[in-house]
Amino acid sequence: MGNTLHHAHLYLSLGLAVLPLHFPFEREGSLQCSCGKATCRQPAKHPFGQLAKNGLKDSSRDPETVQRWFDGRSLNIGIATGTISGIIALDVDPRHDGDTTLAGLEAEHGPLPPTWRFLTGGGGEHILFRHPGGTVANSAGLLGPGLDVRGDGGYIVAPPSRHISRRAYAISVDHHPNDVLLAPPPEWLMQRLSRRKPAAKDAPQERTDWRGHVGATHAEGTRNTALASLTGHLLRNRVDPFAVLDLMLCWNRAHCNPPLDDDEVSATVRSIARKEIDRREAHHAH
Ligand SMILES: [Zn+2]
């Protein structure tokens, strides 16, 4: 409890607006959302209406309000994204291959700059950037599968909230606001976000993109994304990493025009394999 208040004060000191959220509580041996609805669709993630009647609109940067909300209560805490807090957040969900999508984008455009990162209780990550001005809409899937953006009118569940799976949200020790500056979003990211939203009829293809990758020839713009996507797909299905590397080296020569350097293929496969191994270990640990 004190921990939540401590985090709330950190967020206020960073100029972020926070809001009280429902939390998981133990009932008959399992965790349920504190709203009490068995059919809750966002367990332990939605605004706590008793304190924030208008939901997200009640987000606050006022120390007294925040003290009243969190002192002595075991609530989860949200951070409003958008202009109100001066941030946008990249929401990486590995259960929907968001880590693979991000690895593909980084292979194509270069790694993201150091900035604040929060680990989510669902095994993913919130990567925060300075709000670039204007309006940044919330979006799902615009950057690829499992990679969403929380902007104006959105919020993220923040550390030290507890996930319904019992895991806690935590500030990444290597990307703590006390040590790292909040970076502006890379230009390529903003360019991708300003593109047209994919038509609804395209959406179901996301999960079977792999078939397109093995049948098509990839030019410079799509090679890295396709490589990362296929590699992630194979590793996720427990194909041995050395077999994956061999397959991807062959795939690169057969389907990329011009092919990537072998070293680049190896580096991408290695990076995704490491993330996949971390993910499996995290699963075992919980
Ligand atoms: Zn609920």
Image (cartoon, grey):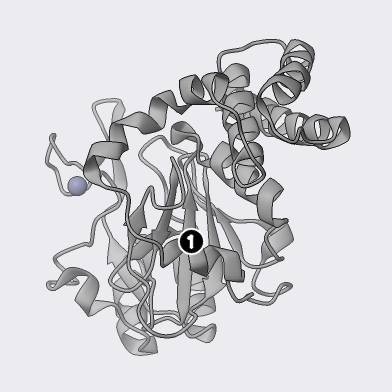
Instruction: Point out the image quarter for the C terminus.
Output: top right
Q: Position of residue 119 (x, y in %)?
A: 56, 51
Near-viewer residue (161 or 251):
251
**Disc 1 residue crowd, few under 14, some 14–19, many 20+, Cα 10 Å:** few
- For the point 50% across and 41% down, the residue is 98
Q: Position of residue 77 (x, y in %)?
A: 37, 63
Q: Position of residue 212 (x, y in %)?
A: 48, 24
- For the point 53% across and 19% down, the residue is 215
- The reply, left or right, for residue 161 in relation to residue 216 is left
Q: Is residue 3 visible?
A: no
For residue 125, above or below residue 19:
above
Instruction: Point out the image quarter for the N terminus.
Output: bottom left
Q: Is residue 110 visible?
A: yes
User: Residue pushed farthest right?
Assistant: 263
Q: Quadrant of residue 224?
A: top right
Callout 1 amino acid: Arg
Q: Position of residue 284 (x, y in %)?
A: 60, 21
Q: What residue sits right under mark 1 in the picture? A: 192
Near-viewer residue (159 or 66):
159
- The reply, left or right, for residue 114 in relation to residue 101 is right
Q: Quadrant of residue 245?
A: top right
Near-viewer residue (140 or 6):
140
Secondary structure type for disc 1: helix
Figure label count: 1
- The reply, left or right, for residue 127 in relation to residue 74 is right
Near-viewer residue (284 or 256):
256
For residue 213, above or below residue 202:
above
